[in-house]
Amino acid sequence: MKDIGKYKVAAIGDQDSILAFNALGIDVFPAETADTVAALLDELAENSYAAIFITEPAAELVKERIAFYREKELPAIVPVPSIKGSTGMGMQQVKDSVKKAVGIDILGFDD
């Protein structure tokens, strides 16, 4: 198991949605274009970030890049709603992860 003390936490997304993360001591990185979000994900993954919160709209722009990192041990990439509300992406990923781990949909969410 890795020493978690050397890792950091970040948030990526539009400025208004991620500003509150800064108050929690989380590093914030405003980004709203696919190129910028993808570049930030790569940079943060290479620089000791163990968890990256990303707004659902930003995550939608880089689904393939997030899928790449899902195969890695770190970082954990967690989609969160933006200030405009949830698209359901984050809950769908939780549902998919549980289904993959257990073999069936035990959460019972509608698709």
Image (cartoon, rainbow, N blue to C red):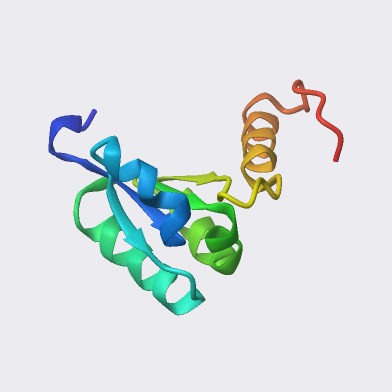
> From the viewer's perspective, is 72 left or right of 50?
right
Q: Quadrant of the C terminus?
A: top right
Q: Is residue 105 above or below residue 48?
A: above
Q: Is residue 76 above or below residue 30?
A: above
Q: Quadrant of the N terminus?
A: top left
Where residue 13 sits in the image (x, y, percent)? 45, 59
* Viewer-nearest residue: 92 or 27: 27
Where residue 3 sits in the image (x, y, percent)? 16, 31
Please indicate, yes or no, whether residue 79 appears anywhere in the rendered image. yes
Q: In the orientation shown, which residue stands out farthest toward the bottom?
A: 35
Please indicate, yes or no, whether residue 3 appears anywhere in the rendered image. no
Identified at 28% across, 58% down, the residue is: 44
Where residue 20 sits in the image (x, y, percent)? 38, 42
> From the viewer's perspective, is 5 left or right of 52?
left
Q: In the orientation shown, which residue stands out farthest toward the front?
A: 16
Identified at 56% across, 50% down, the residue is: 82
Where residue 25 sits in the image (x, y, percent)? 23, 38
Quadrant position of residue 59:
bottom right
Identified at 65% across, 29% down, the residue is: 98
> From the viewer's perspective, is 31 left or right of 102?
left
